[in-house]
Amino acid sequence: MKDIYQVIDTVHLSEKATLLQEQNNEYVLQVDRQANKLEIKRAVEQLFGKKVISVRTANCHGKKKRERRADAGRTAHWKKAIVRLKEGESLDLV
């Protein structure tokens, strides 16, 4: 099992993430690509002291980037975790 400080990278802020937070008490986090749902749940519960109900994950592919040259690069692939907290609990992330 991984160290809990290596599992969660950052918070992912977008319009959809804000909507999920307001309506469903779900938070979107950018996590380590090799982390599984149990490790993510344990990390959130230990770091923030909140009760996690469910965790959903998605692998996000990096976008292709090209800057006026023939050879194209790409941004890094990353993993997204949508964490649902117990009713009445919230995270003060921002």
Image: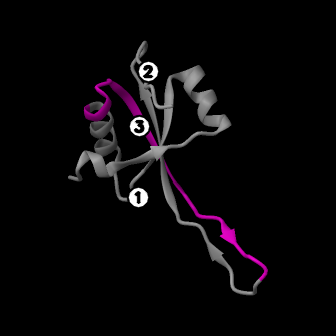
Within the magenta stretch, is there residue 9? no
* Colouring rule applied to residues: one colour
Furthest residue in direction front, as rendered: 94
Residue 73 against residue 10 in the figure, above or below:
below
The residue singled out by tag 2 in the image is: 90
x then y, percent, for residue 61: 57, 62
**What residue do we see at 63% from left, 39% from top?**
14
Q: Mark 1 to mark 3: distance in Å? A: 15 Å
| Residue type (three-letter) at the residue carrying disc 3 | Val
Tell me the SS state at disc 3: strand
As measured in the structure, the alpha-carbon distance from the residue carrying label 2 to the one carrying label 1 is 25 Å
Q: Position of residue 22 (x, y in %)?
A: 59, 21
Determine the image quadrant of residue 88. Answer: top left
Quarter location, residue 48: top left
Between marks 2 and 1 in the image, the one whose residue lies nearer the viewer: 2
In this rendering, the label closer to the viewer, 2 or 3: 2
**Residue at far right of view:** 68
Q: Earlier in the sequence, mark 2 or mark 3?
A: 3
The residue under label 3 is 55
Q: Amino acid at mark 1?
A: Arg
Residue under numbered circle 1: 33
